Amino acid sequence: MAVIDFNQLKNNESSEFQTIRVLDTNGNVINQELFPDLSDEEIVQLFKNMVWSRILHERSTKLNRQGRLGFYAPTAGEEASQVGSEFAMSKDDFLLPAYRDVPQLVLHGLPLYKAFLWSRGHVDGNKYPENFNAIPPQIIIGAQYVQAAGVALGLKKKGANAVAYTYTGDGGTSEGDFYEGMNFAGAFNAPAVFFVQNNGYAISVPRAKQTAAKTLAQKGVAAGIPAVQVDGMDALAMYAVTKAAREYAAAGNGPVLIETLTYRFGPHTLSGDDPKRYRTAEEEQEWLEKDPLIRMRTYLDNKGLWSQEQEEAWTNEVNEQIDEAMALTEQASKQKVSEYLQNVFVDTPASIQAQIDAFRTKEGE
């Protein structure tokens, strides 16, 4: 695999960024120089992770509609961007996800039932093992960029061979935290990899209406950090660029910004958003033809590495995993008001403690 020259990108002060691709929309290799150093077995596993993510999206949507899950942000269409980037990361790296990044969180090592508990607003969904390098998904838009800069600086001070990585959407690039996080990481040469998943809309606001920038990658120029734009529907390109960015940052060269051009096939969240009010059927069809799963499946089919039988068997296995995770989720103990109050404070004020005691009496403790 050819090396991406991030030092050259760091000095790019123009608004021109070439979109990096490895596969075209028909699954053909068009950039052999950047083809990732992955075995056939590893590429198959990458695709299986993408299929897993799509099935998780479909099942999560159904579970939400059944009232068995709470908050859910659709991920269909973004599998290459999310899964392809996560596949290049190490378990030693520290993930700071946004609310749409549950697939990366689970692939990084979080038990799926914990992600389901988080969706349901259960406190146990936020309780992670000490050796698991991640925090729960961030709801505040852009705040994870500031947190990632801090975590990256901590990794640098420890001398760890690891990076902090985080994601936001195109709308997140208009938040102050986005700039502050990148500026801090750049100023202190902290090992962070920042992702902007440009799916075209900040909820219902088109990208062109919330920033005049020609690209989102160029926003790294002001922070003095290298930036690159990648076809976010191309999992192999996402892996190749992410791996190179991770190696660059972990080697002590400072942070990298990666803009991924992708698309969410569904609404912003399942909390009332209707994409038909602001997107045309023609636009959606154009992006559906770029489906990252179709692209990778075609590539694997052409190489004789994947079959319908394999996909059916894997689909059944994934659905069983989800069923098992949901069963664990629904076995979790019900939360109590006394616990809500107790969890707010490290040192509980006397007035709040009195309320806790009163609720515990009512709860039968």
Image (cartoon, rainbow, N blue to C red):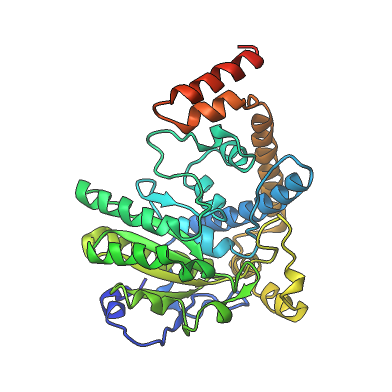
Out of 30 and 335, give the one closest to the viewer. Answer: 335
Left or right: 335 as drawn, with respect to 90? right
On screen, residue 6 versus residue 353, left or right, reads left
Which quarter of the figure has residue 148? bottom left
Q: How far across and how far down the image is residue 252, in percent? A: 22, 61
In which quadrant is the N terminus drawn? bottom left
Figure check: 314 above or below 20: above
Q: Residue furthest front?
A: 351
- Residue 160 appears at what percent x and percent y? 24, 48
* Rendered position, 365 above or below 351: above
> Exactly how many numbered labels are in the figure?
0
Q: Is residue 255 left or right of residue 203?
A: left
Q: Nearer the viewer, residue 270 or 195?
A: 270
Q: Vertical placement of 174 versus 121: above or below? A: below
In percent of the image, x 41 and y 87: which residue is there?
Answer: 16
Residue at left offset 64%, top offset 35%: 325
Residue 54 in sight from this viewpoint: yes
Residue 34 picture location, percent across and down: 41, 74
Residue ID at (62%, 59%): 75
Classify residue 9 by image quadrant: bottom left
Residue 267 position (above or below residue 337): below
* Residue 87 seen by the camera: no
The image quadrant where one finds the C terminus is: top right
> Which residue is found at the position 65% from the left and 26% from the top?
334
Q: Position of residue 7 (x, y in %)?
A: 25, 76
